[in-house]
Amino acid sequence: MGSTYCNLLYHAVFSTKNRQRWISSELETRLFAFMGGTVREKCEGVLLAANGTEDHVHLLLGLHQTKSIANVVRDVKSNSSRWIHQTFPDYADFEWQGGYGAFTVSVSQREKVKRYLARQKTHHGDVSFETEFIILLDAHEIEYDKRYVFD
């Protein structure tokens, strides 16, 4: 085959350090726009959808076949953290949690994931981030030790 054809979609989830409630509605819109720019300009990808709550974010990403999800999440977190510190002096203590979750998404499920992301604020009226994350790990059959998931 003479060319490479890929459609790599990922649902990435990560929280603020210790799930501190840093992401206000004022910050959120600008943060997601900044993250989208980082994905596009530094990672050769596209941010298809983003949402979350005050303590975590969900991103639906379309990535180039040469980019690893680990490097993309690292770049999004480090660049957005630096941007927050530079743009919002009152957020000097802002940090992202060290880890993240990333789940592959088939094209047939893309719109379903977008709808799930769109409902985040309503969803978290009933379900904590911790419960949601465990549900995602279980749904994707990812092994984990509950003692260490939220360190």
Image (cartoon, helix red, strand yellow):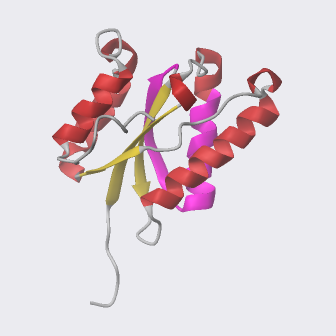
What's the residue at 33%, 20% (across, down)?
Answer: 119
From this view, report whether residue 111 is shown above or below residue 122.
below
Q: Nearer the viewer, residue 145 or 59?
A: 145
Q: Nearer the viewer, residue 149 or 29?
A: 149
**Quadrant of res 88:** top right
**Is residue 93 found left or right of 104 in the rendered image?**
right
Q: Position of residue 80 (x, y in %)?
A: 65, 41
**Is residue 123 found left or right of 14 in the rendered image?**
left
Magenta span of residues? 30-54
**Is residue 35 found left or right of 110 in the rendered image?**
right
From this view, report whether residue 72 is shown above or below residue 96.
below
What's the residue at 72%, 27% (across, down)?
Answer: 93
Q: Nearer the viewer, residue 124 or 114?
A: 124
Q: Position of residue 147 (x, y in %)?
A: 33, 35
What's the residue at 17%, 39% (across, down)?
Answer: 139
Q: Position of residue 133 (x, y in %)?
A: 31, 32
**Quadrant of res 151:** top left
From this view, report whether residue 118 is shown above or below residue 103.
above
From this view, report whether residue 124 is shown above or below residue 19.
above
Task: State yes or no: residue 33 in magenta.
Answer: yes
Q: Quadrant of the N terminus?
A: bottom left
What's the residue at 48%, 52% (across, down)?
Answer: 46
Q: Which residue is farthest top?
A: 125
